[in-house]
Amino acid sequence: NAGVTQTPKFQVLKTGQSMTLQCAQDMNHNSMYWYRQDPGMGLRLIYYSASEGTTDKGEVPNGYNVSRLNKREFSLRLESAAPSQTSVYFCASSESRGTGVFYGYTFGSGTRLTVV
Amino acid sequence: ILNVEQSPQSLHVQEGDSTNFTCSFPSSNFYALHWYRWETAKSPEALFVMTLNGDEKKKGRISATLNTKEGYSYLYIKGSQPEDSATYLCAFGSNYQLIWGAGTKLIIKP
């Protein structure tokens, strides 16, 4: 039972380089999310996809783009990496069946990204 | 700006003792309150999702209560064990947009 799979686990980029973080879930969840986690702070939402075919900005979307490739996959792209994007990135997924019903999130194992 | 506060930031507890910690959130426009357990080198794992004022949830030795009118939730651990050592996160919000606290780091001393 894989759950949420993220790749890569670690990455070092030079300022200005681009890269894509991959995320896939095998639980048939409708909704997927990208978060960043910085020391001393709560998880912050970058982008989310409520369902296949839709994406929306979260709290900190600047410098990032996303693609919901299909129901399983949700990728995060850094077009021109900056040192401020050094962080641990988590992908998550959840079931969602409309308003008033809430489900817990399943998280991937994280990607530790360093931009130098 | 919506804010979720967790206290204390860290907590050392003797094995076998019971403990609790707090999550404070805005009391207006309440949707749901989540609790997660996050062990070092792993990813956060959902414990509870609570939606109703007065809700109480339990999973083994861990339980949680919810007061939406005053904007707080307590997480209780009864008879702490070494495997309870983790950071406990709470998050407040709707299906798609959760605001997360910075967590309470719990260390169980043998």
Image: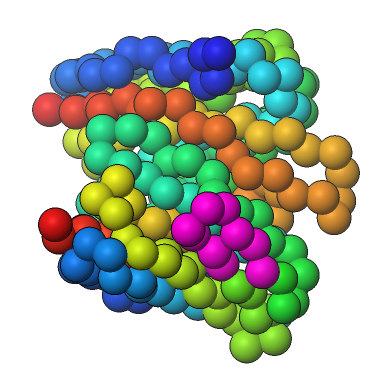
Q: Where is residue A38 in the image (x, y as percent from the top left)?
A: 28, 48
Q: Which residue is drawn at 26% across and 33% down?
A: B41
Q: In this view, does A89 lie to the left or right of A25?
A: left
- Relative to B65, does residue B71 appear above or below in the rendering? below
Q: Which quadrant would residue A15 be assigned to in this image?
A: top left
Residue B43 in view (yes/no)? yes
Residue sitting nearer the eye, A15 or B92: B92
Q: Residue at x 54, y 44 (%)?
A: B46
Residue A9 belongs to magenta span: no
Q: Which residue is drawn at 70% across and 55% down?
A: B94
**Color scheme of the displayed model:** rainbow
- Relative to B76, does residue A61 appear above or below in the rendering? above
Q: The magenta stretch spans which residues?
A: B56-64
Q: Where is residue A14 in the image (x, y as percent from the top left)?
A: 17, 20
Residue sitting nearer the eye, A27 or B93: A27
Q: Residue at x 33, y 33 (%)?
A: B42
